[in-house]
């Protein structure tokens, strides 16, 4: 195969997969968002009635001081996306198009 046909194939596949992922994320994010809101309200209600005891300060204790790890992982993700090249750009384009077409 020659280079232009390979590029066209990668662009087409990336755009199509990105569009499908964008649609799935758009549909699933509404359901997950609502589920998390209901769960948080239920937990806070049960905590206010003394059915649950939650140490909220201890929950965030593991996140403090981990900035270096998060920055390192974000950099690795960015490097991976940059290496994907044309396929990654087409994937992102399809994802953004799906998000814009199906606004709620």
Image: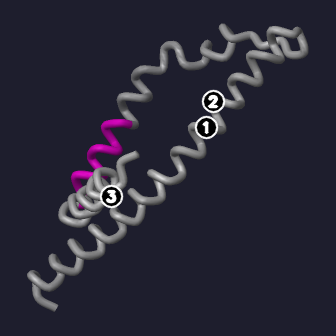
Marks 3/2: CA–CA distance: 25 Å
Helix, strand or loop at mark 2: helix
Tell me the element at label 1. Answer: helix
Instruction: State the image coordinates of residue 81 (x, y, percent, origin top left).
Output: 28, 52
Q: Which residue is mark 3?
A: 98
Q: Which residue is mark 2?
A: 37
Q: Residues within 10 Å of mark 3 (few under 14, many from 20)?
A: many
Residue 75 lies within the magenta run: yes
Residue 19: quadrant of the picture: bottom left
Left or right position of 58 against 60? right
Looking at the image, which residue is at 18% across and 64% down? Answer: 86
* Residue found at x 27% / y 68%: 15
Q: CA distance from mark 1 to mark 3?
A: 21 Å
Q: Quadrant of residue 101?
A: bottom left
Contact flag, marks 3 and 2 (Cβ < 8 Å):
no
Q: Position of residue 37 (x, y in %)?
A: 63, 29
Q: Which residue is label 1 attached to?
A: 34
State the residue in front, 98 or 56.
98
Give the x, y percent position of residue 42.
Answer: 76, 24
Sequence order check: which comes first, mark 3 or mark 2?
Answer: 2
Neighbours of disc 1 within 10 Å: few (<14), some (14-19), many (20+): few
Q: Which residues are magenta?
A: 74-84
Q: Main secondary structure of the magenta part?
A: helix
From the top left corner, tell me how far across and down residue 100 is, in percent. 29, 51
Q: Secondary structure at mark 3?
A: helix
Mark 2, Cα crowd under 10 Å, few <14 / some 14-19 / many 20+, is few
In the depicted structure, whether residue 86 falls above or below residue 41: below
Q: How many marks?
A: 3
Which is nearer the eye, 85 or 93? 93
């Amino acid at each position: 195969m020659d280079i232009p046909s390979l590029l066209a194939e990668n662009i087409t596949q990336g755009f199509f997969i990105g569009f499908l992922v964008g649609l799935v994320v758009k549909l699933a994010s509404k359901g997950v968002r609502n589920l998390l809101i209901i769960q948080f309200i239920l937990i806070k209600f049960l905590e206010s009635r003394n059915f649950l005891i939650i140490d909220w300060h201890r929950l965030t204790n593991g996140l403090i001081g981990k900035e270096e790890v998060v920055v390192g992982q974000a950099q690795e993700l960015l490097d991976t996306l940059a290496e994907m090249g044309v396929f990654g750009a087409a994937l992102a384009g399809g994802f953004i198009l799906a998000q814009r077409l199906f606004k709620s």
